[in-house]
Amino acid sequence: MSFEELVPESSYIVRFSDCDPFGHLNNARYIDYFINAREDHLRDTYDMDLADYAKEGLGWVVSGHDIVYVRPANYNERIVIRSSLIAMDANRLWVEMTMLNAEGTQLKAMLWSRFTPIDVRTGRRCEHPDSFIDSFKRLVLPQAAPGESLQERASRLAKALKAAEPAA
């Protein structure tokens, strides 16, 4: 499995209506951008349509978000969002999403989201079917440093991007 398959990315432009009075992407809108990008990645990279799963009775709800803001995303700026499945089990999915500048050299924000499977017919928590786990376990990109916090992970990634940035 290639890096591009494990960590799909897409490009977006920060919209005026999503910004605060200072022209920065509003803090609450980061999550919208991340979740929309992940849905795009599932559809475009893995041919996974959430509506198809819902028809089969399986859905997911967010059981938690942890986010760290590193640099502002500005009005009309082109950004890149990457996402990856970093862990999964019968009861949860853990997804890491990063927002970068267009060149992919500066980290703007990082989000860790936890998703819990639900039976859409009952609205209650359920377990991932074995077939789902078998299909998607190949897409798990384990963390490079298991056990590190989100802040530590974001700091390590920001330093790695800065070190890889070409000299001006």
Image (cartoon, grey):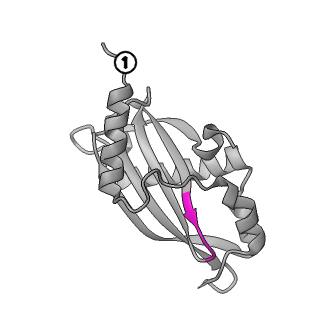
Q: Quadrant of residue 55?
A: bottom right
Apparent side of residue 63 relative to residue 89 in the rendered image (left or right): left
- Give percent across and percent down for residue 110: 38, 50
What is the crowding at mark 1: few (fewer than 14 residues within 10 Å), some, or many (at least 20)?
few
What residue is shown with label 1?
A: 166
Residue found at x 71% / y 63%: 51
Q: Name above or below for residue 36 compared with residue 99.
A: below
Tell me which segment is drawn in magenta.
Answer: 86-90
Apparent side of residue 159 relative to residue 3 in the rendered image (left or right): left
Q: Is residue 73 visible?
A: no
Is 12 one of the magenta-colored residues?
no
Q: Is residue 46 visible?
A: yes
- Give percent across and percent down for residue 64: 42, 69
Q: Name above or below for residue 95 compared with residue 90.
A: above
Looking at the rendered structure, the kind of residue marked 1 is Pro
Instruction: Say which quadrant the N terminus sits in.
Output: top right
Residue found at x 28% / y 40%: 72
